[in-house]
Image (cartoon, rainbow, N blue to C red):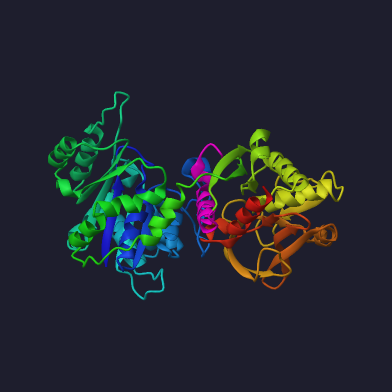
Amino acid sequence: MKYIVVTGGVISGIGKGITASSIGLLLKQCGYSVTAIKIDPYLNLDAGTMSPYEHGECYVLSDGGETDLDLGNYERFLGIRLTRDHNLTTGKVYQRVLADERRGAYLGKTVQVVPHVTTTIKDWICETAEIQVSPKSTNDICLVELGGTIGDIESMPFVEALRQLAFEKPSEVCFVHVSLLPLLQSGELKTKPTQHSLKELMGLGISPDFLCLRAGKPVSESLLDKLSVSCQIHKQNIIINENISHIYQVPLLFKKQGFHEKLLEKLQLLSPICDLKDWTILSSHFEKPVTQKIAIVGKYTGLSDSYLSLIRSLEYASFRENIGIVIQFVDSEDIDWGSVKEADGLVIAGGFGNRGVEGKIRCCEYARKHHIPLLGICLGLQMIAIEFARNVLGLENANSTEFDEECVPIVTDMSPYCQEIKGGTMRLGLQHIQVDNSRFYESSVTERHRHRYELNPQYYEEFEKNGLNITGKSFTEGKSENAEIIELEDHPFYVGCQFHPEYTFPNPIFEKFLTKTNQCF
């Protein structure tokens, strides 16, 4: 097994995930089987209880793991299916170490960061790297992305563990350090932050093999010479990642600089031809003129990463259907009706809590009455149902017990299979959905879930009598049926999904949604 460790300096959110994913894509297109691990040094066990404003979207895996959004990048770029063990956090590490200590695994030794915590981290990485994530029987290369920024105190045990791993496997590990060259208003790129970042990393015992520079403009040869000498990295191993119009250009940018060939040479692997023909076609699509405006209605619109998988799914669907799109965000707490009325299609995004739900309900009503294509995801399905109950069935006080515990009538309620203690009590991961008489689903599907509340079966019959058909159902332990897909009759596209189709990539429902937006306007 070969390991490529990606670290970051100067600031967080610098693009380590896209860098790692792009490297992985290049190596995959060279014929290697690639897997990936994301290390998040925070103390949380996973991303399940974190606000999207804290860390971007919570990505859900097939096994129900609630993880960092970069695992979504890995799955989409590499076409693999990861597990909850592929996201390693400080909380998970200490949970395992303390469990081992309690059962006497350390034989009376004083439990310390070195060697016990670092050994646990190394073992976790090596064990997880062997998990099969694609049809190929064995993995060749494992990408390990260290979240945060070098110098963060919470990262220290992971940095030390990675240093030890490289010492123990000198021919199997290489390091890529991603750093920022700040661009001043004067137009000058500054190297000092990168130099200090490298100094910090080298002081911790890691001398990176490659330096990947984020830069706002082309980097001069003299500046590269300066960095090569001061950072002790060969000039040919400094990769430039300039600001570009979209992420799909990054693998092409790396290939042009021969990044994959240099990595394979360092890892003592053969360097076959890297075929990016299909990826080049995909990348060129995003230069097309915009013909459709899609509005995402949500309450975390201040950070686009809160809806990253949804954005990527819409983008890929636009490529598949050859439709140029622009995605706009509409804050459900303060609806910009101009944006809603200009949109060719609306997506009602998922979420938790009562903040902004009335705005989502009003958008559902507008799309229903004006025949605007609408896709409601998770909470979005519940908004469709509540709006329909209020304005079509005449149940003006219809609501969810999530927003009003005393509401009557109850249209959505806590799933009987979720405990009434918030935190880690949701329906998570893959669920099989039986499809019947759907206009947009041709057969039964298996989709990823992340929710606590579901439609009240008491109103199924009334919904269907009035044209809101339940076309997809799941069956929990054979005891009850749960509404998974609802579709409105006599409407171009008005669909609610209790699951999250954006986590199953690529998902054809987005293509069908965009096709309808294209036909309607």
Q: Is 304 in the magenta?
A: yes
Q: Is 309 in the magenta?
A: yes
**Which residue is farthest left?**
229
Quarter occupied by residue 327: top right
The relative height of residue 168 versus residue 349 in the rendered view (above or below) is below
Give the percent coordinates (x, y) of residue 356: 66, 39
Prevalent SS, magenta region: helix
The relative height of residue 83 versus residue 205 in the rendered view (above or below) is below
**Which residue is farthest bottom?**
137
Residue located at (74% from left, 48% from top): 371
Name the foreground residue: 381 vs 156: 381
Residue located at (27% from left, 61% from top): 3
Quarter occupied by residue 36: bottom left
Q: Is residue 483 visible?
A: yes
Give the percent coordinates (x, y) of residue 428: 57, 60
Does residue 366 appear left or right of residue 95 in this picture?
right
Does residue 92 appear left or right of residue 406 in this picture?
left
Name the foreground residue: 227 vs 430: 227
Name the foreground residue: 379 vs 205: 379
Give the percent coordinates (x, y) of residue 361: 72, 43
Give the percent coordinates (x, y) of residue 202: 19, 44
Does residue 99 appear left or right of residue 499 in this picture?
left
**Which residue is farthest top?**
186
The magenta-colored residue range is: 301-322
Quarter occupied by residue 169: bottom left
The relative height of residue 89 versus residue 332 in the rendered view (above or below) is below
